[in-house]
Image (cartoon, rainbow, N blue to C red):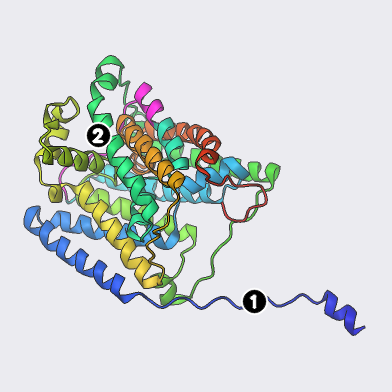
Amino acid sequence: MTTLSARTTPRPAPPAAPAPPPQWAAVALGVIAAAGLAVAVAVVAGPVLVLALALGLGLGLALFHSRFGFTSAWRQLVAVGQGAALRAHMLMLAVAAVLFAVILSSGLALGGDLQPQLGPIGVALFAGAFLFGVGMQIGGSCASGTLFNVGSGQLAIVYTLVGFVVGSVLATMTWSFWTETLSRGPVVDLAATFGYPGALALSLAAMAAIVGATYLLGRRRTPPPIEQPPSAQGVRRVLRGSWPLWVGALVLAGLNAATLVVTGSPWGITSAFALWGARALEAVGADPSTWTYWSSPGNAAQLARPVLADRTSVMDFGIMIGALVAAGLGGVFRLHRQIPLRTIAGAVIGGVLMGYGARIAGGCNIGAYFSGIASFSLHGWLWGLTALVGTVAGLALRPLFRLPVPKPGDARC
């Protein structure tokens, strides 16, 4: 009887491993970098961009703690039918759309006139979004993921960031092909067509339909559950632990809305990569200001300003520093030095595809997808659908770089 009881009584779960202690050196480095950058930005550009830097720091913290992924969300959906992360996207988009509708309709802004993220629909959009979707899966990260992973010490993703810059430069060099040889297409603003209440209702209905579709797909394919790492509770969880995806979704939506109010434009990432590439070319004697891309008034103004007066650059720096501080507080900042050559090749090639794709499509997973949909631009929805198609192609290419493709029994995708 004792033997039977021993066989049938489930074993208690092993105790969770204790959280690593904070790495105060990494935290101090991040705090010093943030303070120094804030002073420099205040001198160069003024208080509005200091607030933008603070928002970037918050975005870095939120992205790191929630591990809020765009690359992994589409990979999970396509590979094993797991839609939990995509449902978190829809929550984020729904909250952002409500906030954007209030802000845009009321004209509430500190940084001048409000400029929603609207983009044209044409060949460049579909080509760029497809390339971005492919690049995400072989580069190992998206635009926002690249920044917070670099900040947390993932050296492999540094190669992705380099590829992003190179791809952005290549896109600016070939800009006339996409704008002159091929038509850019119309801009479809759902708010202008249906009003903000109608555009919001239509957007929320589309998001609800996508959530329902993920549940139907899950019933057909029975995906594995997403493995959630153990975490501390209370204040320790906020500062050091892992946040649930829904918390990350709400925080990112709120910070994007705050970015719109503070700077007059929604959150974006990749236009800064083109600027950094142009600055690097200027340093070696080239003159990118003569290129078609940098000849348009908006882009010419960006190129003429110092990098620390560029809102997107300042926020990108903030995201990396915020992730550094978060990783240090969590005791998980690591510099991974041994990186296989195929991983490096995949990171660079994926980054180039994403950098090129983001420029010609008018944005990345943040600027086009997140901010575009929240701004009620039809191009944001089409970007997301096309990037999903690119994800399918990218998954097929992952084995070439010895990157794993999730299987139905995997708990982590």
Q: Are marks 2 and 1 in contact (CB under 8 Å)?
A: no
Looking at the rendering, which quadrant does residue 3 occupy? bottom right
Distance between mark 2 and mark 1 Cα atoms: 51 Å
In this rendering, is residue 395 above or below 70? above
- List x then y, in percent, for residue 33: 20, 64
Magenta residues (range) = 111-128
The amino acid pointed to by label 2 is Val
Residue 405 colored magenta? no
The residue shown at (16%, 58%) is 50
Q: Please indicate whether residue 330 sits to the left or right of residue 85 in the image.
A: left
- List x then y, in percent, for residue 304: 9, 39
Sequence-wise first label, 2 or 1: 1
Residue ID for mark 2: 169
The residue shown at (45%, 46%) is 343
- List x then y, in percent, for residue 82: 60, 48
Numbered label attached to residue 14: 1
Which element is circle 2 on? helix
